[in-house]
Image: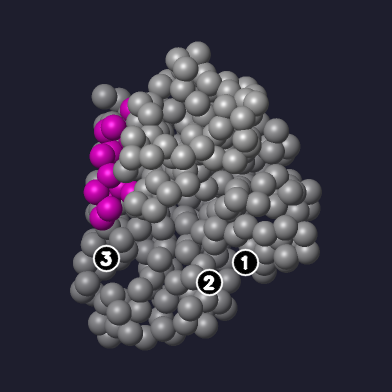
Amino acid sequence: MTFIDQWQTASQRNASSLCVGLDPEPERLPAPWTHDTTRLFDFCAAIVDATADLVCAYKPQIAHFAAVGAETQLEKLINHIHRNAPGVPVILDAKRGDIGSTARHYAREAFERYGADALTVSPFMGADSLDPYIDHYPERGLFVLCRTSNPGGEDLQALQLAAEGLHPHLATQGNAGPPQVSLAPSGGGSGEADSWGHLERVFERVARLATGSWNRNGQIGLVTGASRPDDIARIRAIAPDAPLLIPGIGAQGGDLLATVRAARHRFLINASRSVLYASSGPDFATAARAEAVQLRAAIAAAMAA
């Protein structure tokens, strides 16, 4: 089964568009596990067991495990998800981006060592940085970073591409800021203006390429943060059916209703801290379930609004 089929099946079965991020911080683990880096698996496995019927995916963050030498715990956790939440896909959040043999090893790490069903990747090095994943693991998913919610995302992602016939590098915009978002389809050529006269921005080019010519296996989605719903709407106009992985709801305070209206369908709303740390006491798993129930219901209500 392909990643997208697995995700859609889990979403329908659990009536859910909620993805729970598994980003354990040792200092925030409940007592008596606080600061105990050998307990990352135990903590995350308890979250999984409490929420397995409420989610459409899990997204463990590799650095939270690797930084404390807990890669074996991450392997064990993904195996636990596949066993105890059968059919729920695992998206390994690693944001890999390289070419050639290095990319092949990253692919092998994600899909063979860890057994992930999908992986987050950076598009900065272009199409051939995705080829090793697609060529060797065509049934696995890739989520390409497109429009991130961090303030530094403005440094590159919102810049306009030069118009056709001008220099191919990115044009600077001075202090004017990015142009108004248009929902008109983006132009097809390099740096072309759309029918509203807006030059294509970097994140729009990423959305068009990643879900177009790069998407040879039909398993590519996009990562777009909830802090910019207007840009989510623009991405959706460019990529009408692409899966959108949307972090920034929950503890980060993204506007859920605006996000859902912009994304429309085929999305995964990711929440991490608000679920993981719903309680710092021995009832942490029960509290995580209650928070996941609330989030799943809120997403459903926003979709029906």
The residue pinned by badge 1 equals 114
Q: Is residue 42 above or below residue 234?
A: below
| Magenta extent | 243-261
Report the front residue among 236 and 302: 236
Q: Nearer the viewer, residue 294 or 242?
A: 242
* Up-down relation of residue 304 to residue 259 (above or below): above
- The image shows residue 218 at horizontal and vertical percentages of 67, 36
Q: Which residue is mark 2?
A: 74
Looking at the picture, tell me which residue is in the foreground, 256 or 296.
256
Circle 2: element type: helix
The quarter of the picture where residue 48 lies is: bottom left
In this rendering, would 203 be left or right of 218? Answer: left
Tags 1 and 2 in contact by the CB under 8 Å rule? yes
For residue 217, say whether it is visible: yes
Residue at label 3?
277
Query: How far separated are the C-alphas under marks 1 and 2?
Result: 7 Å
